[in-house]
Image (spheres, helix red, strand yellow):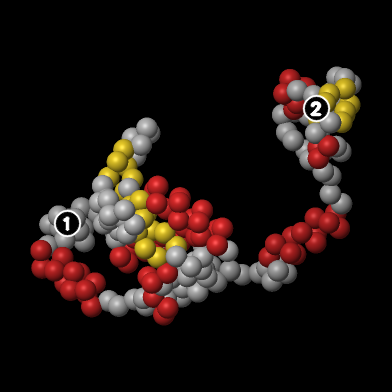
Amino acid sequence: MAYEKCAICGGLFKIPKWRVGKAKYCSIKCQHQMLKNTGGVWKGKKRSKKTIKRMKLAKNNGQFKKGHIPWSAGKKIGVPVNAFGKGHIPWNKGKTGVFSEETLQKIRDARARQTFPHGKDHWHWKDVPAYSAVHKWLVKEYGNPQFCEFCGIEGEYKERKDGSKFWTIEWSNKTGQYIKDRKHYFGLCAKCHINYDKGHTKQK
């Protein structure tokens, strides 16, 4: 921490190091007093005439000089005032705002014809993906394992203390290589999964 002197009351106040040279006032009260002293306007940094001129040129790229005639001079642009007068029929009159069944069917047919890259052809495919990504891919492609391949217990949904549910049979890695290939994984219950991973680690 560092200390800075207040520009209004002159008192010292504590500030973090990154605010050294930036902090000016010890409180909102002193900041409001500064605004009163300056007529309620934050004057900021005073710029030279040379700087102001350079800023103006940078703003319009130097193309709009004094005497420049805009392209819209003398032209009537926009929507006429009397465009929506009495008797005007709006474009959406009689429309319900809901697609008809015929239109919905056309949308369904169009979406059914759409094809997207899948598997290795997809632009986000990774040969060595993250741990969580592999497990999400397995569940998406093959669903949850139905039974433990060691003890034969069948899977079921159980509830955690926070109310969320989980499937009791997990996808377990056989080879230690986390790649998107079904033959590298099999379904195990939590107990068998832990025992298998312990034994597999020792074998390595």
> Dot 2 surroundings within 10 Å: few (below 14), some, or many (20 or more)?
many
Residue at the location (19% across, 55% down)? Answer: 97
Q: Which mark is residue 98?
A: 1
Viewer can see residue 181: yes
Q: Residue at image x 29%, y 41%? A: 158
Label 1: element kind: loop
What residue does disc 2 label? 25
- Sequence-wise, the earlier of marks 2 and 1 is 2
Q: Position of residue 22 (x, y in %)?
A: 82, 38
| Residue 127 locus on image (x, y percent) | 50, 74
Left or right of 187: which side holds 110? left
Residue 90, quarter of picture: bottom left
Disc 2/disc 1 C-alpha distance (Å): 58 Å
Q: Name the outermost residue toward the bottom.
A: 121
Is 4 rendered above or below residue 119? Answer: above
On screen, residue 111 versus residue 202, left or right, reads: left
Q: Is residue 65 left or right of residue 156?
A: right
In the drawing, what numbered circle is on residue 111? Answer: none
Is residue 129 shown to the viewer in this render? no
Q: Please tell me whether mark 2 sits on a helix, a strand or a loop.
A: loop
Three-letter code, disc 2: Tyr
Amino acid type indicated by mark 1: Val
